[in-house]
Image (cartoon, rainbow, N blue to C red):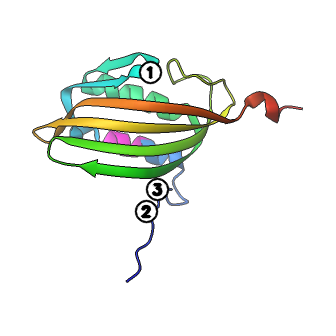
Amino acid sequence: MQSSPITLRPAPTIDALQAHHQMLLALRELYAPNVVWTAPAREIRHSGREDVIRHLLREASAMHEPEYSLLRRSMNERQIIDEFAVRFVYAGAGIDKAPVDAGDFVELKRVRILDLSLGKVTIETCIENWTVLLPAASAKP
């Protein structure tokens, strides 16, 4: 029996941004009410489920034409570790302290460390690596 790779691209009727928003809203209940979300390299910290969801939706909205690739996942009853890459054109606003410029085509590699308690995410730490694949300036004549 042949296995097929996981497809992270949504069906053609739903664009990637809409699919990502729907996923975040559906996963809201997986976050504990007092969840803490951090991105240490950018010195970003958000507390509380609604603030974290609002933050994640805002970040997703800043990613034009995102393409997600799951690289690795491991989990146990206390922790989930997801490593993924997303390539997108940065809108220029929506990702606090983003080390890229508006219009840059970038790849963001993120390792998400989710600490769990009673089946809910209590702490999400994002270790990030940003790479500009095509600067906005090089696309202009």
Label 3 environment density (alpha carbons within 10 Å; few <14, some 14–19, many ≥20): few
- Image position, residue 34 (x, y; %): 19, 23
- Image position, residue 119 (x, y; %): 14, 42
Q: Is residue 115 above or below residue 36?
A: below
Residue lying at 26% horizontally and 43% vertically, measured from the top left? 80
Element class at badge 2: loop
Q: Nearer the viewer, mark 2 or mark 1?
A: 1
Figure quadrant of the C terminus: top right
| 115 displayed left or right of 57 | left
Element class at badge 3: loop
Q: Which mark is residue 107?
A: none
What kind of residue is marked 1?
Ala
Element class at badge 1: helix
Magenta stretch contains residue 48: no
Q: Main secondary structure of the magenta part?
A: helix
Q: Which mark is residue 6?
A: 2
Res 38 → quadrant: top left
Residue to which mark 3 is pinned: 8
Residue to which mark 1 is pinned: 41
Magenta stretch contains residue 24: yes
Q: Nearer the viewer, residue 96 or 71?
A: 71
Tag 2 and tag 3, C-beta contact below 8 Å: yes
What kind of residue is marked 2?
Ile
What kind of residue is marked 3?
Leu
- Image position, residue 112 (x, y; %): 35, 37
Query: Mark 3 or mark 1, which is nearer the start of the sequence?
Result: 3
- Image position, residue 66 (x, y; %): 56, 44
Q: Is residue 93 above or below residue 19?
A: above
**Cα distance, mark 2 to mark 3?**
6 Å
Tag 1 and tag 3, C-beta contact below 8 Å: no
Bounds of the magenta segment: 21-25
